[in-house]
Image (cartoon, rainbow, N blue to C red):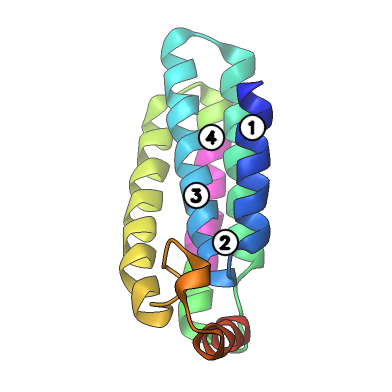
Amino acid sequence: MWNSAHDTYLESRVLSASPLELIRLLYQGALGAVREARRFLAEGKIAERSRSISKACEIVIELNASLHHEQGSEIATRLAALYDYMLRRLLEANQRQSDEPLADVLGLLSTLSEAWAAAVPLAEPVIAAENPWSVPPETATAVASQAWSL
């Protein structure tokens, strides 16, 4: 029952999120998957560790796919290289059954997530509001159109 309610909540959150909030959710998901992989590695749970690493890889691939190379070419290029590095380290962690690459990826994801969280409120102050009904319609429309154009 809990998973069903949690899955429904998460689905609702994803469907109602702005593109900028979706990136934040992807970072949270990747961080959680890497943390789980480290825990499963320590517990000797091979299948669970492998699934968590695969989940982290899928999320990093999605983050890479979300880059807009034509709009932010230098930043997008650097992030693409960083995501590629993280993918290689995740695969290395799975192959070698080693914690060190997972710790490396966790540190990189944490840094990027913190930077994103610091930058996003500047770009979308209204969307961060807990209650979307408290935002005047004209403000919500303007912020939404701005967010989708990013």
Q: Is residue 132 visible?
A: yes
From the viewer's perspective, tell me whether residue 82 is left or right of residue 149.
left
Where's residue 20, x and y in %? 52, 70
Q: Amino acid at mark 1?
A: Ala
Dots 1 and 2: beta carbons under 8 Å? no
What element does badge 4 sit on?
helix
Q: Looking at the rendering, which quadrant does residue 54 occupy?
A: top right
Q: Which residue is mark 3?
A: 86
Q: Mark 1 or mark 2, which has the lower sequence index?
A: 1
Query: What's the CA distance linking mark 1 and mark 2?
Result: 20 Å
Q: Looking at the rendering, which quadrant does residue 49 occupy?
A: top right
From the viewer's perspective, tell me whether residue 45 is left or right of residue 11.
left
Which disc is residue 5 wearing? 1
Q: Mark 2 or mark 4, which has the lower sequence index?
A: 2
From the viewer's perspective, tell me whether residue 30 is left or right of residue 5.
left
Which disc is residue 43 wearing? none
Query: What's the CA distance linking mark 1 and mark 3?
Result: 32 Å
Query: What's the CA distance linking mark 2 and mark 4?
Result: 27 Å
Dots 1 and 3: beta carbons under 8 Å? no
Q: Mark 3 or mark 2, which has the lower sequence index?
A: 2
Q: Which residue is mark 2?
A: 22
Query: What's the CA distance linking mark 4 and mark 1?
Result: 35 Å
* The residue stretch that appears in magenta: 80-91
Q: Amino acid at mark 3?
A: Met
What element does badge 1 sit on?
helix
Q: Say few, some or many: other residues with alpha carbon within 10 Å of mark 1 (under 14 / 14 to 19 / 20 or more).
A: few
What element does badge 3 sit on?
helix
Which one is closest to the eye, mark 3 or mark 4?
3
Quadrant in which the C terminus is drawn: bottom right
Q: Mark 4 or mark 1, which has the lower sequence index?
A: 1
Which one is closest to the eye, mark 2 or mark 4?
2
Where's residue 58, x and y in %? 66, 46
